[in-house]
Structure formats: structure tokens, C-alpha cells
Image (cartoon, grey):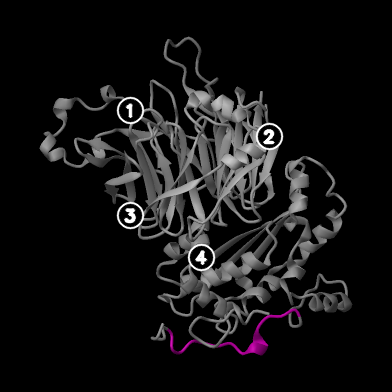
Amino acid sequence: MSDIINANPTILNPSDLPTRHSESRKKQSSSAHIADKISRLPTSKSLLYDPFSSSPGEDSAYSSGSGSDQDGDDEDETAAEDIDEQEIYDLISTISDPEHPLSLGELAVINLPHIHVTHTPPTPQNPHPMSHVLVEITPTINHCSLATVIGLGVRVRLEQALPPRFRIDVRIREGTHQSTDQVNKQLNDKERVAAACENETLMGVLSNMLATCK
Amino acid sequence: MALKLVGSFPVQPDRVWCAAPHPHLPLVATASTDRAVRIFSLRDFSLVSTIEGGHKRSIRSISWKPNAKGESVLATGSFDSSTGIWHRDEHGSRDDREQSLELNSEERDENEEWRFAVVLDGHDSEVKSVAWSSGGSFLATCSRDKTVWIWEDMGNENYETIAVLQDHSQDVKMVAWHPEEELLASSSYDDTVRLYKEDTDDWVCCAVLTGHTSTVWSISFEKNGHQSRLVSASDDQTARVWHRKPKAESENPSMQPPSIIKGTADETENWEEQSCLPKVHDRTIYSVDWSKKTGLIATAGGDGQIVLYKEVDNKKDPPNTGLEPSKQWKIVAQVPAAHGVYEINSVTWCPKWDKKGTTVDGELLLSTGDDGIVNIFEFIL
């Protein structure tokens, strides 16, 4: 990594990056509610961590067919609604680029319109609300060899921060990289990601990238 | 018809990759991210032993050696690039087994002495799958290094590499042996399945199965005396059944080029896709297992579902044509959220045991998930 791959990237002004402040969210009922949401932005993992899905006790309760987990349902569904594109953006736009002292948001590698979140409500067949997030990455140059490392950083950050009901897809945005399919296949191979996370050298690079996350 | 949850083992807090039932004892071994192998009893679903210290990274795969005399032998494949062989004496011959099982659990624990016998080095990167041949004389391993290795058990804990197969162009995900023949299959990130057999002195690729449009994660052979079939499951969200076409159906031998030109072993067996199972998974299918007992196929994957398929006569066939009725695959059971919100990494069929340790009618299906749990299901007619 001694040779800088893109020595002169385009940089966005931090004040132009999307936040809840600048976003016009007409659906929100009151500004007080928005302020409340801002104060609840992810300062720690635990805020996002969904106790409904993560507690092992809950799972064994489900496994044995008992309905003892009904109490918390309303609250948990509200929590599910809370995680939207902006919140995903806040989680990953602050990741540092592996070769520039800049964030992925500032380099426009991560862009709010390229994040898609869908929530599936519980059904009679599946009592669990499920969620899906698709993040499309725009590498700074189309032959960026660090695209895989950046993608892995985004995936690892989301896997650590999001509750387990989330299915995560990280892709290189169509037409922005010369080996999009190859990188996408690797980034979404569960086993390769798991093995990469046991590689100390790679994890050293990733932990530096993630150190700037709030 | 339904799959009913009859029990579960909490293995560890993180992902359990797979579970393997013992070839003749009521035991199941699990492979998990905490670098340990755990062995559970299928009589009372209790933890019997935890084997640690052999691997430096996650254990991805595990296989019991069939026909091991007087001992149990396990092979483990790890992300640390090595394969481990573990031994435990079985208190005398198989005839004494009944007696040894009479021991209460405390005594059993004292007698549980697993020994890390051999480390098989050779792969350049993570070992993804390990599998003993049905006779127990060969062990196949595969890796992200794109190779499949075959090791022969020479006795006295000696293993010899008898083949390094480099036919895949990418990461090899799984190896599986035919239940009756010495025929090996491997599936890969290169979207293909390859079959290998011994040709004079060399192991060679004898068929390539193409059709999947993404990584083939899992493969399983059918056990059926008169025909050979294989099912494969993929990241393309499909599971496909392939069959070996009998020699008689292939071209007139005199039409084939002389053997000296034929050269490529790829043509020595003629396999083709027979059917695609009904499509119900909407994420990667990570695992497929063909029951050697009932002929049912089970699949599971990233969408958290377990699905069972049965082959039935095609009702659309006109009756009395004199031809053998055509078959089709039908879904007979479907369990959404079989591990809550978590992904499922493997499904494995396994005999059912009573509390005394004798096999009884019926069959169990074991599933392992990212929740660190093995769930045990029974198929109820």
C-alpha cells in the first residue's frame, strides 16, 4: 500500500454530506420528534442492537414453541422502523478510506441514495420481522484494487452494528468498477468474509478504517 | 406432513458451521467458529465432550470415518489450512458397544479421551470441507486454494496424498463421496460440480456438471442401488438433481474417437441435469442433504428456511402409456425461521435413537445456524 492508487480523489465538503438536519423529511410529525431521533443516533452499538432478536433466551423460547416473547413485540417493531437509510449512512460513511485520511462519505464512496433498506413485517408463517439492506459502493476510480477491502469494511461494520434480523448485501455500483461481478461475489460470500475476519493482517487494516466510526 | 422440532443443542454463542452424526453410535459432532468440536448424545441431547486445541482458526467441516474398528475417528477441516485427525478408543469391539453405553454419563465422560493424532498439511489456504469415503479408506479435503486432495489411510496414523486435483478454477466449497462407489464429487465458487474417479493409477476428473449460475455450496449423492444421482445447492437460489446416463444411452462406441485422442477424462462419465427442485428459497442455499433412508431431500440457507422435497409420480402423465411414469419433485414440508432470524448453515439427516441407544424407526434432521444452535427436527407423516 505504499503506492497511492488514487492520488487525487474528488472530496465532498463535510457540510454537504446528508444528515438528519438537512434532510427534508415531510413524513415526520414534529420537529421535536426529529430532535429525539437525532439524540438517539448510534453513539454505541447497544442502541441499535435489537434485544428482541439478539437475546439467546428469546431464541430458545421460540425454538421450544413457546409464545413467551410476545410482550416486547410492539416496542421491537418500532425499533425496526428506526433503522433507515440515513442511519445506515451514519454507520458507514464515517469509515476511513484505507489510503486517504478521509471518510467514505467525504470521498462519495458511500452515498445516501445508494443505500436501500426494506423491512418485512412478521407473517403468520414467520413470526419474526426481517430486514434487508443493500449498500452500493462507488469506488473513487474504476480499477481501484482497494474496492474489496472497502466493501469488506462496510460489511463488517454493518454485521457488527445491525441486529441479526438484517440480511446485508454490499455491492459495487454497476459501471463504476472494471471487475464489479468478481468483487461482488467475493463480498457476499459468507465463508470468505468469515475467513477474512480471522486474518490478522486484514483485520488490522479494517480496524484502522473502522476506528473513525462514531 | 410437517417437520416438528424435537430438541436442540446450544453449542456456543456464535456460528455453528455443521453437524455430523456418528456412523454407528448415537452421537453427533459439531464444527464451529470457536475452534472446538463438540460431541452431543442423540439419546438425551446432552453434551458429551468438547475437543479443543487442535486448530488455530474456525473449524469449518467435520466427518466421522466409517468402519473404524474399535475406535472413533474424526477428521476436521479448518480455516487454519490444516486438516486434523482425532481418535478415541471405543472400549473394545463393536460387540461390546451395548455394554459401554450402559455406563452412566459420569463414567462415560471419564472414558472420553480424544487424541489429536495427525495434522494433514498441504493446502495453501482455508480447508472448506472434509469427507471420508464410504469404505473409510480415503479422505477427501478441499480448499480456497482451488484444489481437492485425496488422502489414503495407510494404517498406524499414516496418511498418504494420492491425488491433488486442480480442475476447479476457484475456491472449492465442498467434497462428497458416492455412498457405494469410489466416486468423489466437489462443488465450487466457479459455479460447477466435478466428479472424479480412479482411472488405472490416477484419480481424474470424469464429469463436469454445469448449469448453476453462481457458487455451488453443497452437494449430496442419492443412495439407490440401481441409479446414480446427485443434488447440488447454490447461491443462485436453486437446487438441482443430476443423474448419470447409463452407458447404453450414450453414443455408439464405434462412433467415438479412438481412445488415444479421447484423452480428456472429462468425457468418461455422462452426467446431466435431470430436474430443478421447486424454487422457494430467496437467499443463498447453503446446504442440501439427500436422505439415504427415505429419499427425501432437505435444503436450508440464508433465508432461514428448511424445505423438504419428495419425488412423486407426475400426475399430469396420461395413464396406461406403458411407459415408466415420469417423476417430479414436490415440497412436503417447509419451516420458515427455523433458527429464528438467523441464517442456516447446514442440514443433515441422522438416525433416530431411543434413550437406551438403539436405533428406532424414523429419521431426524439436524440444522445448524448462525445463532450457535443445533436444532433437531423429525419429519411427521
The amino acid beneath tag 1 is Lys
**The N terminus of chain B lies in which quarter of the figure?**
top right
- The answer to whether mark 3 and mark 4 are in CB contact below 8 A is no
Q: Which residue is mark 3?
A: B169
**In what element is the residue under mark 3?**
loop
Mark 1 or mark 3, which has the lower sequence index? 3
Give the chain letter at badge 2: B
Res B280 seen here: no
Give the chain letter at badge 1: B
Magenta segment? A6-20
Give the chain letter at badge 3: B
Q: Quadrant of residue A114?
A: bottom right
- The answer to whether mark 1 and mark 3 are in CB contact below 8 A is no
In depth, the one of A195 and B135 nearer the eye is: B135
**In what element is the residue under mark 4?**
loop
Q: Residue at horizontal 80%, vertical 58%?
A: A77
Q: Which mark is residue B245?
A: 1
- Give the mark toward the camera: 4 or 1: 4
Estimate how packed mark 2 is, as few (under 14), some (14 to 19) or many (20 or more) residues with alpha carbons within 10 Å. some
